[in-house]
Image: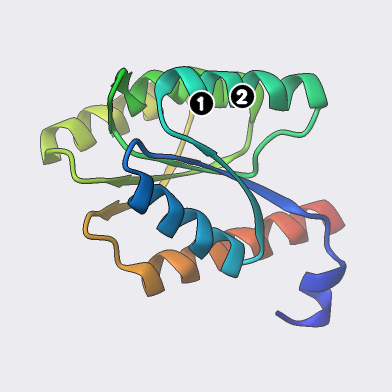
Amino acid sequence: MNSADDSARVTRALVIDDDLIQRRLIAKTAVQAGHETTEACSVTEAEARFSQARLDRRPFDCVTVDLGLTDGLGADLLHMIVETCPGAKVLIVTGASQQLIEDTRKIAQDIGIEIAQVFIKPIDLPGLRETLRQMRRTAAESSAA
């Protein structure tokens, strides 16, 4: 990171995945890209993380979402992202079907969320890291403006 990145405010990422190994890999990659990370393993836990972010007035800047969670679909969380983290960048990181990915994109578009990128499992970690770095730079530039 350069000195401009070091002086920027902390950017926060929420990593939502029910697979512990995948979740930890994504979270570690987000930390390497300069994000403070929080993890959630289910829709229920993610909802609690969003509620806490709202109470703390510390919205997430970036959210990675697996679409197939043990207690529901990642797409079920899109409304909470809009409500609690307006402007957050959303990445889909999933092994779900192309149809579910397209359906999720449509839902996101309908409620005003842009899906920044989709990563299919197994994850391209260097590609994910670079995308997360770019998101951090963009968030830092936005807060400096």
- Left or right: residue 133 versus residue 102 is right
Other-residue count near label 1 (Cα within 10 Å), few / some / many at <14 / 14–19 / ≥20: many
Residue 145, visible in the rendered structure? no
Pointer 2 with pointer 1, Cβ within 8 A: yes
Q: Which residue is mark 1?
A: 46
Q: Residue 143 at x, y = what percent?
A: 81, 52
- Left or right: residue 22 versus residue 81 is left
Q: Amino acid at mark 1?
A: Ala
Residue nearest the viewer, comparing 89 with 22: 22
- Location of residue 140 (image quadrant): bottom right
Q: Which residue is mark 2?
A: 50
Circle on res. 101: none
Q: Is disc 2 placed on a helix, strand or loop?
A: helix
Q: Residue 132 at x, y = what percent?
A: 53, 61
Q: Residue 58 at x, y = what percent?
A: 77, 34
Q: Determine whether 12 is above or below 129 in the image.
A: above
Q: Seen from this angle, which residue lies furthest front?
A: 20
Residue nearest the viewer, comparing 74 with 104: 74
